[in-house]
Image (tube, grey):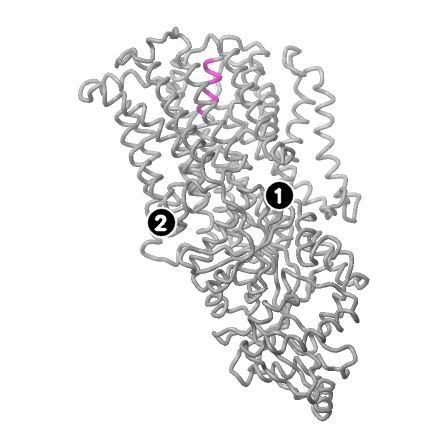
Amino acid sequence: MYATLLRRAGGPLLSVLLLCLALWALHAMASEVTYRQIGAYVHGLPNGDIALAVLLTAAGFAVMTLYDWFGLASVGKRLPAKRVGLISFISYAFSNALGMSLLVSGSIRYRFYVQAGLTTGEIARVVLYTTLSFWLGLAALTGVTLLIVPIPPEVPLSGLRIPLAVLLTAVPLAWFGVAVFVRRPIRVWRWAISSPTPLVAARQILVGAFDWGLAAGVLYVLMPEAIVGGFGHFLAIFVLAQMAGLISHVPGGLGVFEAVMLAGFGATGNHGLEAPILGSLAAYRAVYYLLPLCVATLMVIVRELRALRHAALITPWFAGLLPPFFAGLTLVCGAVLLFSGATLAIPGRMELLRGFVPLPLVEAAHFLSSVVGMLLLILARGLQRRLDAAYWLTLVLLVLGAVLSMLKGIDYEEATLLTLLALALAPAHRHFYRRASLFRATFSPGWVLAIAAVFACATWLVFFSFKHVEYSNNLWWEFSFRHGGAPRALRALVGAAAVVMLFALANLIRPARTRRARPNEAELARAMPLLKQFSSAQAHLALVADKALMFAPEDKAFIMYDVEGRSWVAMGDPVGEDEDARRELVWSFREECERAGGWPLFYQVRPEDLDLYLEVGMNLLKIGEEARVRLETFNLDGKSKKTLRGTVNKLARDGLRLEIVPVEGVPAMLPRLKLISEAWMRDKKVREKRFSLGLWDERYLSRTPMAVVWQGDVPVAFANMFLTESMEEASVDLMRHLPEGPAGIMDFLFIELMSWAKANGYRWFNLGMAPLSGLQNRRTAPLWSRFGAMVFGRGERFYNFRGLHRYKDKFDPEWEPRYIAVPGGIALPLALANVASLISGGIGGVVRR
């Protein structure tokens, strides 16, 4: 347990530690700098420099689009440039400002590209291409710069300049060398990566370097003209600072990037320029990070307002981006309010405010604005989880925050940002449909890190902005227009801290939900109407009663699941016809697993329900195909059915007949059928399976009709039946026959059952799964697909994969893919082993038949 906790929290804790060290270093290096000096430099920047920085930022984001464009070309896919540009802009606006780990730029791409028709393997290759280009460009630019530009010995690690430069330059050169000389996949541990062509490799390196060069140019035009060393020295320090920020995993490199930049320029003879350098860094954050987010917000407002008149404009791939998009912007707005509350208001605006707003109202507005900021940081997680309550509270707090921003210091800039987000969020209520409690939302280590990082920066800003003020106990009770900045900031910081502590306390004292036991008869009775009306007959597996049941409110849907190790495995899709209830159940199940420290998995899910799992950020792996016979066209005519036709006719002449025993007649039959089951088990030398299959249990078998094959007065085979009242599908589960029975008896059973189901108006007959069927073993296929295809072709020693597929295929079924939905980042082999253990009745059953 402690090892798991350390593994999950170790990275975020290290990032928080690095952030605190960076803030301490910034405080030490800028000990003589005041907040007013930084603000004066920012306000004094020439309009021409700001316009050039904005232009370079636009060019940089245009270049970033090439990552995705060329990445799609590398997998042979072409998508509309407008779509690619929009998804690239939104994902990079988030990842640049907030870090990849927070809003998971890769998962946003995954959702978009899956809905655009790309396979999981193709998406993985696109993400790999973009990530590799990103780092190759940075390594190339950093290595070449350090080789060319000498660094003063005062710069930390300057003695390692040449070795570091050679190492970084060697990375893109090695990649290009692979492209020129290697023509086979490159094996890295268990992974095989297709070698690029020379053109692709050169394109990756150049695009990445150009992207980073433009980012450096944005900051350079904002820097003071008096900096020593010119662009070469600046570029060397910039790329090293960016690397430090990325390695720290602090969202946006906040604090770490600034500390390295200030240390680098301080060591190269720029003494006395600390305030202008920090001012240029603040302007850089606003232009290169905050401005794209504002532009993205305007784009969403326009699109949402147009969608109010033309619903078709909001396409599924775009709608899937909106919740994480709004969550990111809410996080930014919360940070802006906290940072604003930690700094000194503009004196001229305070003097203007003094004329018509009473001091108590100003003090209350300042305090409450920081409280609202912290609440927005917390609510951002609820927006990402699509909570209805989070939507309404966020909307109210954004409007309230805008009003408070004006009352506390006429901060119209942040009021405008909050108002824009409120306008964009207002028409988007349909995307936040979950009625779950805010206190049930789980916070991942990444989200905790983001909130901790923002609060740490706000704390640092308080002490930095008012370091000239001597602390005393009386400071807390000082209220003044002219000299009340420090007391207001301290009180606001305590208010924000109180909010997050109270929320954490409410989560800690929340009653722990115990893991549910196996269902009793009352729960099975609640599930019965749902599974009878469900489109898939496999929902009847709930009647085995070996899996716990999780119900939606008002019993509109349920999930059946079991736990093995850390894996909470749901069998199939949520059962029920109410789509909102089914969608909410997927969210609730995932949150329940996260609270218990487990991995949520959904086993054997159908293609029509994939959006349920993509929506909560899960990944999908194909695990096989299910055989379903369309009964409307089913018959034994034609040459291909000659063998089946002959078998059925022969066994009918030998006196075999099928009887459908209704539920009420099954208990009386079970003693005779048990003899068949025991003989079959002895002959096959197998043990009972479970979870995705039924087992011999008289209580379970008494809940379903039974198909019995008779030879005279003796039963020789049986199968319990899954029948839906919607007449959509019929199926069977537990099938047994006497070993000494006539040859072809199972063919006879299936043919007679399908004929009976067709005559009674059923549309489909489900023959069940063929595990690992349909997986590709191509060189470009994902590792899981190739491994599964290999086992399907060569794993007959352990399981008759190919033989099972051939047997079902002779009934001419339509093969439909089935998937397993898993959260990203889990130990997939262990999770799959847990699933196998569930099905086999324990680890021993995995290796024994």
Residue 12's spot in the image, x, y percent? 57, 30
Dot 1 corresponds to which residue?
825
Magenta residue check for 276: yes
Residue 774's spot in the image, x, y percent? 68, 64
Dot 2 corresponds to which residue?
429
Q: Is the magenta stretch mostly helix, strand or loop?
A: helix
Figure quadrant of the N terminus: top right
Magenta residue check for 123: no
Q: Which quadrant would residue 639 be assigned to in this image?
A: bottom right
Residue 509's spot in the image, x, y percent? 45, 34
Residue projecting furthest to the left:
356
Query: Which residue is painted at 34% across and 38% down in the image?
Result: 420
The amino acid on which the numbered mark 2 sits, given as a three-letter code, is: His
Query: Which residue is painted at 31% across and 27% down in the image?
Result: 368
| In this view, 134 is above or below 791 | above
Q: Who comes first in sequence, dot 1 or dot 2? A: 2
Front residue of 807/294: it is: 807
Magenta part of the protein: which range? 275-283
Q: Dot 2 lies on which element?
A: helix
Specify whether 480 is left or right of 335. Answer: left
Q: Dot 1 lies on which element?
A: loop
